[in-house]
Image (spheres, rainbow, N blue to C red):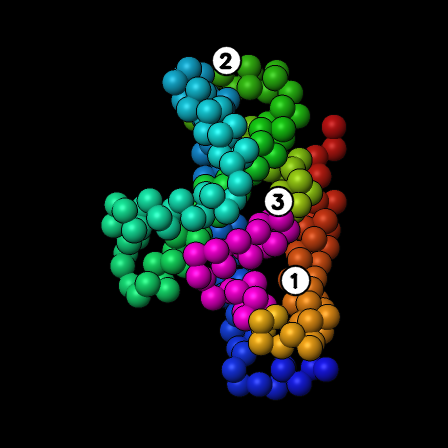
């Protein structure tokens, strides 16, 4: 039943390694982009607040498949943006990361904004009374406490991101979902085994992440 695992035709570990790379790069980019968006959403500048609100509401409610396929078709194939160049596979990989960052950053932003709301307003007012700028108040006082409050919600966002990497198969990125599609077509007599192997693979990727970040959330939680 599991004979396909020994076939040199299928690079199972290589496909899951691409999934891991997609997750790591996208998670890092999403945290940075989501933090910037959260800063815009609480900014005293109306134009930045308007941009952050519009971006989050539009992109968050757009299907991820459209975001990633749009990055590939519009940015790469139409506008010829290559993000540093490379082979077509490498460019597709970068476009997939760009799409995942653009999409997941909105969820990071909203999780972080909920954490910002848990910080007492008096702290910001006291900091401003001392002469600190908005940027200093945000980065030195608000965000450190906000991140500690939202580790668990961010863990859920990162787990969802791991599963969302399967959408990258839509533009031909050779990650786990694309290999599963190929194996389903070629190993039609072992469908349940193929699904079981890939389901187990994603459980092994997401379960340790959830357990670790759940432990971190308990360790760094802000006691109010």
Alpha-carbon distance for marks 1 and 2? Answer: 50 Å
Determine the secondary structure under disc 1: helix
Per the image, the residue denoted by label 3 is 157
Q: Quadrant of the N terminus?
A: bottom right
- Between discs 3 and 1, the one toward the N terminus: 3
Per the image, the residue denoted by label 1 is 202
Q: Position of residue 219 (x, y in %)?
A: 72, 46
Whether tag 1 and tag 2 are in contact, CB under 8 A, the answer is no
- Between discs 1 and 2, the one toward the N terminus: 2
Q: Which residues are magenta?
A: 158-182
Q: Nearer the viewer, residue 109 or 3?
A: 3
When the figure is inspected, residue 83 is found, relative to residue 16, above or below; the finding is above
Per the image, the residue denoted by label 2 is 129
Disc 3 versus disc 1: nearer the observer: 1
Q: Nearer the viewer, residue 150 or 222?
A: 150
Q: Residue at x 58, y 76 (%)?
A: 186
Question: Dot 1, how many residues are within 10 Å of its Cα: few (below 14), some (14-19), or many (20+)?
Answer: some
Alpha-carbon distance for marks 3 and 1? Answer: 15 Å
């Amino acid at each position: 039943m599991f004979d396909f695992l020994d076939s040199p035709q299928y690079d199972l570990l290589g496909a899951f390694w691409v999934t891991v790379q997609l997750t790591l790069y996208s998670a890092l980019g999403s945290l940075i982009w989501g933090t910037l968006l959260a800063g815009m959403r609480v900014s005293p500048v109306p134009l930045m607040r308007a941009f952050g609100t519009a971006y989050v509401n539009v992109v968050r409610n757009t299907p991820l498949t459209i975001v990633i396929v749009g990055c590939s078709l519009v940015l790469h194939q139409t506008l010829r943006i290559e993000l540093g160049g490379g082979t077509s596979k490498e460019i597709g990989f970068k476009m997939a990361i760009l799409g995942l960052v653009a999409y997941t950053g909105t969820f990071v932003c909203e999780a972080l904004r909920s954490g910002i709301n848990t910080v007492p307003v008096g702290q910001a007012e006291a900091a401003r009374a001392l002469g600190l700028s908005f940027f200093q108040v945000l980065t030195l006082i608000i965000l450190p406490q906000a991140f500690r409050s939202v580790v668990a919600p961010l863990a859920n966002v990162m787990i969802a991101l791991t599963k969302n990497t399967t959408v990258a198969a839509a533009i031909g990125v050779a990650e786990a979902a694309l290999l599963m599609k190929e194996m389903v077509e070629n190993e039609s007599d072992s469908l349940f085994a193929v699904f079981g192997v890939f389901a187990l693979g994603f459980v092994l990727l997401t379960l340790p992440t959830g357990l670790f970040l759940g432990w971190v959330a308990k360790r760094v939680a802000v006691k109010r």
